[in-house]
Image: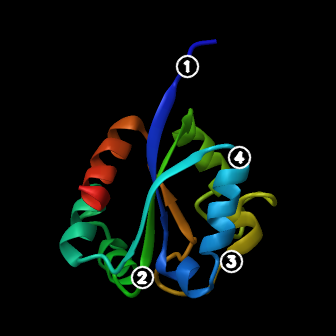
Amino acid sequence: MTSHVEETLVLVKPDGVARNLTGQVLARIEAKGYTITDLRMLVPTREMLVRHYEEHEGKPFFEPLVEFMGSGPVVAVRVRGQRVIEGFRSLAGATEPTTAAPGTIRGDLGRDWGEAVQKNLVHGSDSTLSAERELAIWFG
């Protein structure tokens, strides 16, 4: 087998931070065997969020999403490991917390809150290109 070490961005979103779930998310990342190489807590600026979610600009959920993500602290995590992009997305679970499998972050800790924007605790980059772009936004 060939080595495929990569880095990804993981965000603990404002709902995860507000519910004091950051430690559980980080523990799951480490228990999976991935390495946390950088971590910071910040309230993201609108500019950062518009850059991060640029592919969704113009969609009906864009403004509520940007507003939600800027509503409180976010924990940004640079994670490194073998196939970590695919691995973290599997660990996070399906985007919709109601249908996310038990054993995943969203399946165990998330639920539908009946609000205009989906609060699903975490974000993980979906490709190496996205990871590079997103890590540059959040870590410079």
Q: Is residue 33 above or below residue 98?
A: above
Q: Secondary structure at mark 3?
A: loop
Residue 128: give x, y in percent of width and height: 39, 36
> If the image is split into quadrants, where does the C terminus sit?
bottom left
CA distance separating discs 1 and 2: 35 Å
Q: Is residue 76 visible?
A: yes
Q: Is residue 53 above or below residue 70?
A: above
Mark seen at residue 103: none
Residue at point 55% right, 87% down?
Answer: 18
Q: Nearer the viewer, residue 113 or 44?
A: 44
Q: Which residue is mark 2?
A: 73
Residue 134: give x, y in percent of width and height: 32, 52
Residue 100: give x, y in percent of width and height: 71, 60
Q: Which residue is mark 1?
A: 3
Amino acid type of disc 2?
Answer: Pro
Q: Kindly indicate whether the residue at mark 2 contacts the one at mark 1 (C-beta within 8 angstroms).
A: no
Q: Which residue is mark 4?
A: 32
Q: Kindly indicate whether the residue at mark 4 contacts the one at mark 3 (C-beta within 8 angstroms).
A: no
**Which of pointers 3 and 2 lies earlier in the amino acid sequence?**
2
Q: Which residue is mark 3?
A: 111
Residue at point 44% right, 41% down?
Answer: 7
Nearest-to-viewer mark from 3 and 1 = 1
Amino acid type of disc 1?
Answer: Ser
Q: Nearer the viewer, residue 104 or 138?
A: 138
> If the image is split into quadrants, where does the N terminus sit?
top right
